[in-house]
Amino acid sequence: MGVGVEAGAQAARSRALAVLRIRSRALAVALLPAAVAVILLAGGSSGHLVGRSWDLARWIMGVAAIVVLLAAGAIALVVARARPAVSPTVAIAEESAPDLYRMVRDLADRLDVPAPSAIALTPDCDSWLEDRTHPSHGPPPQESGDEITGVRSLTPGRSRRTAAAPVLVIGSPFLWWMRVGELRAVLAPVVAGTGPSAHPDIAAARRFVRGLDAAVAVTSAPRGPVFRSVLAGVGWVARLLLRSCRGHAAEMERGVAAAAAERAQAVDYGLRIVAQEQVGLAYAGWDRLLTRVALPAWRMGRWPSRLDAGVVAALTELSRRDRLAEGFASRLGERPACDLLEEPGTIDEATSLLAARLFHGGPAETGPDWAPVAWQEYPEEVVDRKWRTDAARLHRVLDTLGVRRAPDPAAPHHDPPTLARVVDHLTDPTTTAGRTDDRTDGRADDRADDRYGEAEAVDPYAPDATLTDPSTPAQPEAPAPHSEAAPHREAPPEPEPYKAMAADDDDEELGESGSPHSAALAAGLTAELAREEAATPPISAAPPGQGPDTGLWDDTGLPLFPLQPPRTGRELLADHVTAMVCCAAMDTAGALPGLDWLDGPTLLVNGERAADLAPRVLSLVEDGDPAPLRAWLMDLGIRPEKPVRLV
């Protein structure tokens, strides 16, 4: 082990020296004109370099030296004052987690490395060491007064740069899902990295690279034209130096990681192999929880306040469904790592809010439009409101498009919010013509007679069915002439907004395989969502002293890590139609909103998940075929002609 550790550390030190040599060369280039100017001035004063040409050379080199020194000083000032990037975390004070600090220090003693200076949590499935020794990352210097002399001085240890070990950043899902022994085994190679990090050459090389990176960020920030032109040269020099030392810095970090991994071989090696399986499982559960469960709540202005506890529930559900994960459920009887915290609920709430800010861009503090939600309140506060809000948006777009089901001109301008209105609009007449002919031959589903009390086996919600003569086939291209005895329902004329939206829709998935009705409705939903997002007030930054590490990272570019790309028109339309179906099921068939830990919002019919709804909705949205969805509605006793309650 000693040979491997020494080899990795030596490789890291050699690469660090290469980075420092680049810094020295840059300094030499900056001092070169000044050195030449000094030589010329010394030669003139000694009488060796005399004449008009030497005088001109002295003037030129003197001016060049002054310009270069001023430019180098400006670059050095920007690099020194630029604040390096820091990962958004939730700081854990030692008073709130004494057992966790004790475990980390014991681990550092076993590895014979310096203990981390502090511990922080991040809403991600990863752990690392982070250098926060820059003066801007620490607390403001405290002034102490001398009672005798009255002299005020800075507290010792905060003069120019704090010489402290890096901060240990731990992924919060690890604390809730892993057991104490597993967490110690996973953190062993991370804590072992404090040994190479304490070497002066490696620390200096890292500070230089981080300073250059921060300087590039400063010069790239939007500013006025004067500052932009001045900082353009600084940015060019910083990028040139970064490109020069990029390879050496990467190899240095690989050497540090290799030395740390080799040193950690002697600590819980067998348990670490098992714990690595839990890392992958925790990552899968965390990603599923964020994208399927948390994201719908964030879009509704609610943020789940116990995301880390939800990971345990999601992975437990996965172990129940997947036979490959059966052995993981037996671990729940052991002591979880979150027991190392004094108040795990408070810390879970802080990391949950940070996750909402990072992955969705939510505000820094709670309010009427941004409130925490407990898991037991999720179905009512999130699922029910989400479905009814989407259904209301869907009918607003239908009203904008001028879609009406009522054949009577004296009927109200807007149709009631029914599922039948949506299904009729999305139905492609070409897919129902043949099915209507089959019904006239007596091959219709007899379940419609028993459920709705019809004399004929006809679907009363077909878009082109007659109201008095069910045996009349639908003919969208050549409608039958009207008569007083059997008035025929004509499809409403295509309004101008409908044509405009269909022309502007560039969603290829609906534009090629979907009907024009679906394409226009998807475009209308996209435009409506864009208007709602534009009307949302901008997110304000956290007030001073609030939020997780607010003084260490810039929150102006939230969300930093969007979970999903913008939804396509087909996805939006399918989500809204699904919401409308769920609203009809809740209002007419007694279904309930529910939470599935792996799939998010779900519809509970007679206490069981309705897992077969999605393909039937896609059949209607993409193919214009309502038959699978209508059969599903009749099986569950859902009445699509009944109005639903909207938000």
Image: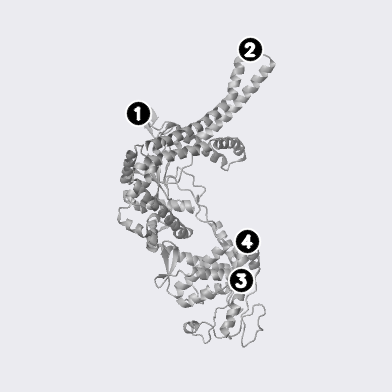
Q: CA distance from mark 4 to mark 1?
A: 73 Å
Give the residue number, with chain letter if any, for mark 4. 506
Q: Position of residue 294 (x, y in %)?
A: 45, 58
Mark closer to the chain start, 4 or 1: 1
Residue contact between numbered discs 2 and 1, judged by CB atoms under 8 Å:
no
- The answer to whether residue 342 is seen in the rendering is no
Other-residue count near label 2 (Cα within 10 Å), few / some / many at <14 / 14–19 / ≥20: few
Asked if the residue under mark 4 is in contact with the one under mark 3, i.e. CB atoms within 8 Å, the reply is no
For the point 30% across and 56% down, the residue is 333
Return the residue at label 2. 48
Q: CA distance from mark 1 to mark 3?
A: 80 Å
Q: Nearer the viewer, residue 337 or 426?
A: 337
Q: Secondary structure at mark 1?
A: loop
Q: Between disc 2 and disc 3, whose residue precedes?
A: 2
Mark 2 and mark 1: Cα distance apart in space: 58 Å
Identify the residue shown where x is 30% and y is 45%: 99
Q: Which mark is residue 402?
A: 3
**Pointer 3 local density, CA inside 10 Å: few below 14, some 14–19, many at least 20:** some
Q: Which residue is mark 1?
A: 146
Type of amino acid under label 1: Asp
Mark 4 neighbour class, 10 Å CA radius: few under 14, some 14 to 19, many 20 or more: some
Q: Nearer the viewer, mark 2 or mark 1?
A: 2
In the current view of this chain or complex, which residue is farthest to the right?
A: 52
Q: Position of residue 152 (x, y in %)?
A: 39, 29
Q: Nearer the viewer, mark 2 or mark 3?
A: 2
Residue type, mark 4 in image: Asp
Q: Which sits earlier in the primary sequence, circle 2 or circle 1?
A: 2
